[in-house]
Image: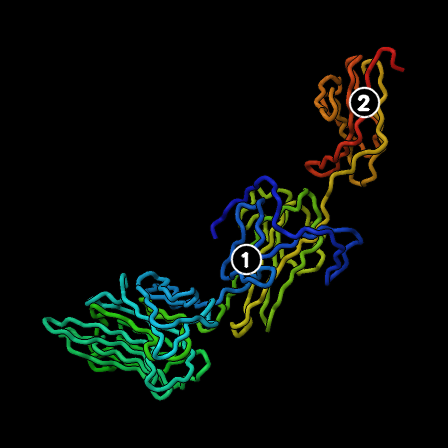
Amino acid sequence: MTAVRYGLRPLMSLLVVLALAITVPAFGQIPASTVMTLKVNGATLSPSSPRQWLLDGVELAAAGQGTDIVLRSGPQDGSTLAPDLVLDFDGEAPMDAAGRWAVETLGPYARAPGRFGDGSGTFRAPFTKLDLRPRGSVLFRADEPMGDFSIEFWLNPARADSGEIVMLWKATRRVGRLSQPQQLTALVLRNRMTFGFVNFFSDAAGREHSVSLQGTSVLVPGRWSHHLVRHDATTGLLEYLMDGKPEAVAYATSTGRQGGALLTATSGGVGRLELASNYTGLLDEFAFCSRFVEDPALVKHAPGGGTAVSPVYDLGATHSQLVSISTATRTPGDSAVHWTYRIADSAVSWTDNSPGWKPFIPGRLLGTEASGRYVQVRMALYPDGSGEQSPVVSSVSFNYEPDLAPAPPTRISATPGDGSISVYWSPAAESDVRGYMVYYGHAPGDYFGIDAAQCPSPVVVHGADSSSALLTGLTNGSLYYVAVSGFDAADPPHIGDFSREVTARPSRISP
């Protein structure tokens, strides 16, 4: 991941649930106090963050009133590399995600829950089929060698009757002045898949050749199975695998065995591909790719899992104490979620890995070092051992105590003197108060006075127990408006609200 610096934007209203709560984590005890809870999910944005959610290998899933974070479901290999045709059947109408084939749906079409993604294609013979024509295909360019290639798809037949046609490619090959019909078929025979290549491979003289691959495993109606045919142009190997296990092997060579003169796979011209032309059942993740697929993805989720990094969230005040981070998470089977966080008073210089991430256990107390204004969480999601079940993260809650500014002093008063004003107040009760700011000016609420010998407004008075200040060098006869606020030990300090406003008019005859 490229290092990116995090900047700040003006504070705006977060689209989050912000509530007051008394929180008792699963592990440990939060000191008896009122803490704030900032609750977010995968759809919660932050105006304080230059980047929003960063998802790698995970995706968002609508769930009731919220949005869950789950592992992305889909092939992690095969069609995702060197794609020539990709039909994932996730949209309302089938289309080639690689953009190289025109797809036309013939007959009534509907989607059903798929092996991967949002859906699969539903087909019913003889009423529904797909008609595809190459319009920029790399593999199926007329009279040009293909090299390595792979064909793969997921199948869930309703009957698996003999004669059902899953795939049929028809074209015409030109050999000198002659034309040869070309076919590539995937059909069901005796409840097993059979692949046939007629005039698909040829020798240097253009002689006709036929190659077939017949599976040995029985198709089970109502159950998904993965089918892969792959060709290695350097050896002539043509192999069929079902659910990752070899079913049939042939060699596109002059002898039909390893070591013979290689035959070249070449597409004919004016070709068309029919899918499910005589098939009843579901079809998903149909793909052509121009490479030899070594390790097809047979599970829903990659073993390495995925990660999600939240935006930077603003807790509203520096030196806020992050008490704990609780999560709403489901981990079916032996799936898991690993958590890290980081927090600081400023996020201006943040990069992907600085400041460093700290691991935490959801609900457990974090300790006094978890202090700051800006917080970010990162989660690593891992599937169960079968690769079929994903953990689900529904929400993350930051439980924190904001370091609020001191409350304004009470019982303030001002006594005029000759060119001076004595200001008195009752000290604030907060333990972290470090001093007071005395504001003065010549209009109500307008504390921009510059007369006092001490300094322009405000005058800083250090000491938590301080309760008075003397302003000198003022103009006799002028009415001054005065207010006081406290500040704490934060760096920079939090300055509280103004106290009640009082007035005083210096005079030579003042007591």
Question: Residue 254 placed where, x, y %?
Answer: 19, 79
Residue under numbered circle 2: 503
User: Residue 489 or 415: which is nearer the viewer?
Assistant: 415
* Residue 108 lies in quadrant: bottom left
Q: Is residue 16 above or below residue 11?
A: below
Image position of 286 (left or right of 468) = left
Q: What secondary structure is found at the residue carrying circle 1?
A: strand
Question: Residue 82 placed where, x, y %?
Answer: 34, 63
User: Residue 363 or 281: which is nearer the viewer?
Assistant: 281
Residue under numbered circle 1: 308
Q: Residue furthest top?
A: 508
Q: Is residue 481 above or below residue 40?
A: above
Q: Is residue 29 visible?
A: yes
The label on residue 192 is none
Q: In which quadrant will I find the C terminus?
A: top right
Q: Is residue 368 visible?
A: no
Decide: marks 1, 2 in contact (CB < 8 A)?
A: no
Q: Residue at x 48, y 67 (%)?
A: 73
Image position of 185 (left or right of 15) = left
Chain-order first, disc 1 or disc 2: 1
Crowd around label 1: few <14 · some 14–19 · many ≥20 (10 Å): many
Residue type at the position of mark 2 = Thr
Q: CA distance from mark 1 to mark 2?
A: 57 Å
Q: Residue furthest right?
A: 511
